[in-house]
Structure formats: structure tokens, C-alpha cells
Image: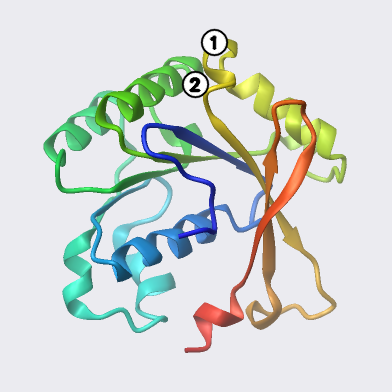
């Protein structure tokens, strides 16, 4: 359970470009929790639950009994819906994933992040969310610009109390999932960025 930096009672924000591997980082992390038979609540706001299982869990030959530990909510959820589902799942889950914050309807990002930060603290449960890099920085390789996007996204009053990470795809001459790897990098309090973990999809798609 070390693909993403998570802590009980804390919100973790994963920022990355399209197809950088944000969703896969969360799914790989979720699989580790499931392997230890720990409950996972996964809000898939852009893909159906069947696609999530077909894309990942079936390909890693997840055992049928493990599916009871993975609850995928696949609707374009409002913040109220997310709160209600989390409340109903209290005591049954060890971690919450939300992919992606931009798909939550009817609320400003600031309000969503503050609410999720509060829920994480009150329930002492780690919450991980993804956020896509804006179009203006989709082609950038400047880490300072990506850190700047996180600062724009996360309200200042909770910024220092959240884990902030960037997911970067490692490009290869091979255009195949077999050689698709990504690196998760952690944003430090001073704005510097350190490597945290690297995952290679060949480890999960070729089993």
C-alpha cells in the first residue's frame, strides 16, 4: 500500500495529465487494501463499475471473494450523494478514492475539498482524489507549473494539512501497455518535488 502517500484522517490530492496513470495509481493502491481484506470505497465518476473491473481487477485475476471488499460507485455524483454513501459505509471501509473531482456536480472545487478534508478528519479515514491538469499545462514538463496548479486547486486554509502528489507518465519508445510506467511524486511543504513510487502496468496486465 505504498503507490500513493496516504495517512489516516488526511486528504491526498493526485494531480496529473490525461492518461498519466492517475486512475491506475489509485486502482493499484486499492488492490493492496483488498488483498489485505480491507474495505475500499471507490467513486468512479468517469467510468462505469464494469469497466473498472474489466480494466483492472479481472486482468489481475482478483479472487471472487475479494470483490466484497471493493464498492464502486459509478455515477456522476453530487457532493451530497458522496457524503451519503460515505456515511452509510462508516465502519466498513479503510480508504476512499474519488476519480475525479472535476466530475462532481453542483459544487465548487473549494467546497468539495474542504468537505472531503473534514470527512477524512472526522472519520479518521484516508481519502484520495484525482484532478486533471488544465489544458494550458497539458504539454508542460515544468514541475513548478504543476505544483502551481495544486496550489490553485487546494484551498489555502487546508493546503498544509493535505498530501499533494503529481503523477507523471514515463514515456517509452514502445507504444504498448506492456511498457507503460508512471511515477508518483510528492510535493513537499517548501514546494520541491521528490519521487515517491513508480508503477509499471506490465506487472498488472500480463498476469
Looking at the image, the residue that sits furthest to the bottom is 207
Q: Residue drawn at (45%, 32%), measured in percent from left and top? A: 11
**Mark 2 or mark 1, earlier in chain:** 2
**Where is residue 172 shown, x and y percent of the image?**
81, 73
- From the viewer's perspective, is 141 left or right of 35? right
- From the viewer's perspective, is 174 left or right of 187? right
Q: Nearer the viewer, mark 2 or mark 1?
A: 1
- The mark found on residue 157 in the picture is 1
Q: Nearer the viewer, residue 84 or 6?
A: 6
Q: Residue drawn at (40%, 54%), measured in percent from left and top? A: 47
The residue under label 2 is: 109
Q: Nearer the viewer, residue 50 or 194?
A: 194
Colour theme? rainbow
- From the viewer's perspective, is 106 left or right of 25? left
Quarter of the image holding residue 171? bottom right
Quarter of the image holding residue 178? bottom right
Amino acid at each position: 500500500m505504498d503507490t500513493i502517500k496516504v495517512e489516516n484522517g488526511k486528504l491526498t490530492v493526485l494531480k496529473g495529465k490525461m492518461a498519466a496513470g492517475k486512475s491506475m495509481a489509485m486502482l493499484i493502491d486499492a488492490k493492496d487494501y483488498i488483498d489485505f481484506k480491507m474495505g475500499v470505497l471507490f467513486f468512479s465518476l468517469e467510468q462505469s463499475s464494469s469497466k473498472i473491473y474489466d480494466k483492472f481487477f479481472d486482468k489481475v485475476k482478483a479472487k471472487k471473494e475479494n470483490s466484497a471488499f471493493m464498492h464502486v460507485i459509478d455515477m456522476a455524483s453530487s457532493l451530497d450523494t458522496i457524503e451519503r454513501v460515505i456515511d452509510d459505509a462508516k465502519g466498513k471501509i479503510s480508504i476512499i478514492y474519488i476519480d475525479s473531482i472535476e466530475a462532481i456536480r453542483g459544487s465548487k472545487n473549494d467546497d468539495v475539498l474542504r468537505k472531503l478534508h473534514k470527512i477524512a478528519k472526522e472519520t479518521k479515514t484516508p481519502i484520495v482524489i484525482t484532478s486533471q491538469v488544465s489544458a494550458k499545462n497539458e504539454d508542460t514538463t515544468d514541475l513548478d507549473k504543476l505544483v502551481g496548479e495544486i496550489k490553485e486547486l487546494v484551498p489555502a486554509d487546508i493546503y498544509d494539512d493535505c498530501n499533494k502528489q503529481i503523477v507523471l507518465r514515463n514515456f517509452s519508445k514502445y507504444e504498448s501497455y506492456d511498457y507503460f510506467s508512471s511515477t508518483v511524486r510528492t510535493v513537499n511543504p517548501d514546494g520541491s518535488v521528490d519521487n515517491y513510487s513508480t508503477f509499471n502496468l506490465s506487472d498488472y496486465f500480463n498476469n
